[in-house]
Image (cartoon, rainbow, N blue to C red):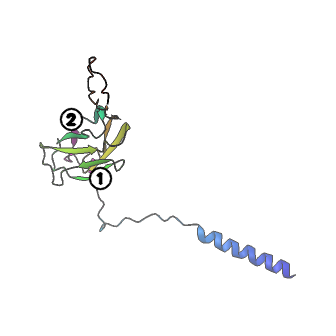
Amino acid sequence: MKKIIITLSILIFTSFIINAQVTNKVKPQKDENIKIEKKISDNPNAPEIEFDKLIHDYGTINKFGDGKCIFIFSNTGKEPLILSKVRSSCGCTVPKWPKNPILPGRSDTIKVKYDTKRLGIINKNVTVTSNAKTSPVILKIKGKVVAQPTEKIPEKQLNDVSSPVNR
C-alpha cells in the first residue's frame, strides 16, 4: 500500500511541475496610450548611406606595410545620418568613423587600419550600423601579407693579385 501511495504522489508532483513549465500565451490588448515605434525603413525621409566601394583590396602587401584604407560614404537621404556602431570582425582591424551626424547631401569617411604584422591572407569585415534604411552595411578588406624581402648584404670583392701574408 505504501508503494502505491508513494508512486501516486510522485506522479501528481511531476504533473504539477510539468504544468508549471507550460506558459500560456496571452494576446496583448491594444492600448491607445502606448506609442508604437515605427521602423526606420518605413520612414520615406530616412537617411540613405551610399559607399564609393564596399571592398578594399590591398593586393600583396609587405609585413609591417601600410595597412590603412578609406571608405567614402554619402548621405543621400533627407534626414541626418548617424553612425551608431562600426565594428570589425577581429582585433587586428581598427575602424575610425565620424561621431557627428552627417547632413543630407554630405559625405564623410570611415578609416580602417589593418595590422600588417600578421602574415597570410586578409579577409576581414567591418560592419557599419546606422539609422539608414539599409543598415547594417558590411565593408570588406582583403589581400595578402607577405614577408619582407631580405636585404642583400654587399660582399667585399677580393683582388686576384693579393696573396696571403707570411710571417
Q: Where is residue 106 in the image (x, y as percent from the top left)?
A: 12, 43
Residue that mark 2 sits on: 52
Residue that mark 1 sits on: 39
Q: Where is residue 135 in the image (x, y as percent from the top left)?
A: 29, 46
N-term-proximal mark, 1 vs 2: 1
Q: Position of residue 127 (x, y in %)?
A: 31, 46
Q: Along the horizontal axis of the image, is 78 left or right of 39?
A: left
**Residue 162 can be seen in this image:** yes
Identify the amino acid type marked 2: Asp
**Residue 120: within the magenta?**
no
The residue depicted at 69 percent of the width and 71 percent of the height is 15
Residues at marks 1 and 2, CA–CA distance in whole angstroms: 26 Å
Q: How crowded is mark 1: few (under 14 residues within 10 Å), some or many (20 or more)?
A: few
What mark, if any, has residue 19 been given in the picture? none
Q: Which residue lies furthest to the right in this view?
A: 1
Identify the image quadrant of residue 2: bottom right
The residue depicted at 72 percent of the width and 75 percent of the height is 12
**Residue 113, above or below 14:** above
Q: Disc 1 on helix, strand or loop?
A: loop
Residues drawn in magenta = 36-51
Q: Along the horizontal axis of the image, is 162 left or right of 27?
A: left
Q: Along the horizontal axis of the image, is 121 left or right of 110?
A: right
Q: Which residue lies furthest to the front in this view?
A: 167
Question: Quadrant where the C terminus lies?
Answer: top left
Q: Which residue lies furthest to the bottom in this view?
A: 2
